[in-house]
Amino acid sequence: MENDTGTAIAEALGVLLRRTTRVRLHRQLTEGLGPALDELTYPVLSALARTGPHSAADLAPEIGLDRSGTTRRASRLEEAGLIRREPDPADRRAHLLVLTPQGEQAVAELRRRLTARITEGLADWPPGEAEDFARHLRRFTTEGPFA
């Protein structure tokens, strides 16, 4: 029984973590937010919102890219005014990527859209099940095999 549960969870996580699933979701979330914000640049903006200022080199592993790919995407976001580069006080040779107020607004809209999408997807669940799922998912991510 436990093996079946582990298998079911692994298969569901496989769907969620699949690159095509993430790209499709990011494309839908960023639709209409401007040419610089798309499925390619979304991970950079989202990671900066989650982690705070980072260099491109330090942010790259967080989003699954190399430094040059992160830098290219960050440059697009910078040109659009969503992030800016600041000198790194810990390393004068490096720069930190930092969200601008416009970038923070974009993140707020992206989070609003994601929340609405999740809420819509759970609308038909019986009362209490979505709350239970949220509680168990939080526990799984903080105490489970990926913690």
Image (cartoon, rainbow, N blue to C red):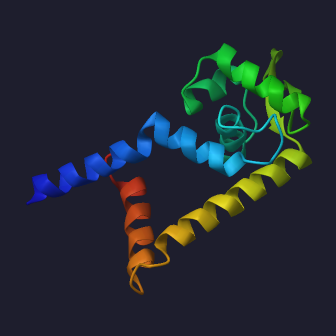
Residue 41 position, x and y percent, is 71, 33
Identify the residue shown where x is 35% and y is 47%.
13
Front position in the image: 125 or 133: 125
Looking at the picture, does residue 37 appear above or below residue 95? below
* Left or right of 117 on screen, residue 104: right
Residue 91, relative to residue 100: is it above or below? Answer: above
Question: How many numbered discs?
Answer: 0
Across and down, in percent, residue 47 comes to 65, 40
Residue 66 coordinates in the image, percent (x, y)? 60, 17
- Picture quadrant where residue 141 is located: bottom left
Pinpoint residue 35: horizontal percent, then vertical percent: 82, 36
Q: Residue furthest bottom?
A: 127
67 vs 71, left or right, is: left
x 8%, y 60%: residue: 1
- Please determine whether, in this image, residue 92 is positioned above or below residue 33: above
Can residue 15 be seen here? Answer: yes
* Above or below, 53 relative to 104: above
**Apparent side of residue 102 relative to residue 52 in the rendered image (left or right):** right
Lateral position of residue 78 relative to residue 67, left or right: right
Identify the residue at horizontal 87%, vertical 30% (top origin). 78
Q: On the image, which quarter does residue 79 sit in? A: top right
**Observer able to see residue 147:** no
